[in-house]
Image (cartoon, helix red, strand yellow):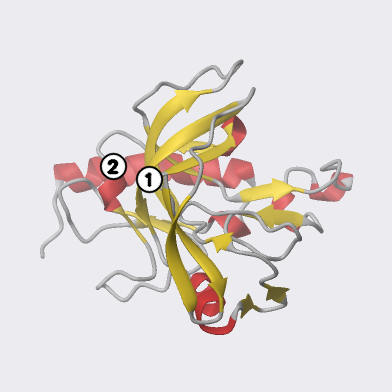
Amino acid sequence: MKAVVVHGAGDLRVDTLPDPTPAAGEVLIAMEWGGICGSDLAYVRHGSSGTAQLKQPLVLGHEFAGRIAELGPGVTGLQIGQRVTAHPATLVGDGQLPTRLAGRTNLYPEIRYCGSAAFDPHTDGGFSELKVVRAEQIRVLPEGVSTTAVRTQATAKGLNLADGLAFFPEGGGERFIRLPFCALSPKEIDDGVKRLAEAVKESQAAPAAR
C-alpha cells in the first residue's frame, strides 16, 4: 500500500508499505479521506510536535474516514463497506481510572494516538491506503454522511477543527457538527454521533442557504 510518511524535518515521502491484515478484534479500513492537523504540519516542518520527537519514520494522520474492507476474527456488529471514522486513541496500561473519573478516558495519563511520535516506537496514523484499528475505535457514520463530507482544519470555511472532525451533510450545505475526539469520552463521542444524525436530518429537511 501507499502511505504518507514523514522521515524528518522537511522530509515527507509517499512510501510503499506492506498491506496490513486485521487480527482478532480488529478492523481494516480502506481510507478515502484524511484531515491535516497542525501536529501533522509540525512533524513535517520541525521533525517534532510539542514534546514528541521523531525517532523513526512515521505515517501521519489521526483524522480520517473510509470504508470497512475486512473484519478480523470475532468482530461483530459491523459490516464490510460501512462508512466509518475511528477514535485515534489507545490507552497504555490497564486503562483503570479513579471512580470519580469513570468513563473519562480522555483524562487517562498515558494515551497513544494514531500518527503520533509521543511514544517509541511511534504509532502510525491513517494517511495510507489501508489502516487497521481495534473494533472499539470504529465510529460508523450516520446515513446521509459520506466519507467525502468529513473535513477538518483545512477546509475553505476556515473552521478551527484541529482537535477533531467536522461532518457535513452529503450533497453539501453549511450546517456542520464538530466532534473533538481527543477531548471527549467514548460516551460523549457516541452522543455526538447521535446529534450528528439529527443535524443531517434537519439539513435535508431545510437546506441552509449558500
| Residue holding disc 2 | 145
Nearer to us in this view, 105 or 117? 117
In the image, farthest residue toward the left: 210
Q: Is residue 58 left or right of residue 197?
A: right
Residue 77, compared with residue 127, is above or below; it is above
Regarding mark 2 in the picture, which secondary structure is present there? loop
Question: What amino acid is found at the position of numbered circle 1 in the picture?
Answer: Leu
Measuring from the top left, give residue 118's x and y in whole percent.
71, 65
Q: Is residue 108 left or right of residue 27?
A: right
Measuring from the top left, give residue 3's x and y in whole percent.
44, 54
Question: What amino acid is found at the position of numbered circle 2 in the picture?
Answer: Val
- Can residue 55 be seen from the camera position used here? yes
In the image, farthest residue toward the right: 98
Residue 97, compared with residue 70, is above or below; it is below
* Residue at figure coordinates x 34%, y 71% from the top left: 154
Residue 138, compared with residue 92, is above or below; it is above
Nearer to us in this view, 185 or 198? 185
Q: Is residue 73 left or right of residue 112?
A: left
Res 196 label: 1
Residue 104, compared with residue 12, is above or below; it is above
* Residue at figure coordinates x 60%, y 64% from the top left: 57
Task: Select label 2 or label 1 by which is in front.
Answer: 2
Sequence order check, earlier mark of 2 and 1: 2
* Contact, mark 2 vs mark 1 (Cβ under 8 Å): yes
For label 1, the crowd category at 10 Å Cα-Cα, with few meaning under 14, some 14 to 19 and many 20 or more, is: many
Res 48 label: none
Measuring from the top left, give residue 14's x and y in whole percent.
41, 61
Residue 177, quarter of the rendered image: bottom left
For label 2, the crowd category at 10 Å Cα-Cα, with few meaning under 14, some 14 to 19 and many 20 or more, is: many
Measuring from the top left, give residue 76's x and y in whole percent.
54, 17
* Residue at figure coordinates x 60%, y 58% from the top left: 182
Regarding mark 1 in the picture, which secondary structure is present there? helix
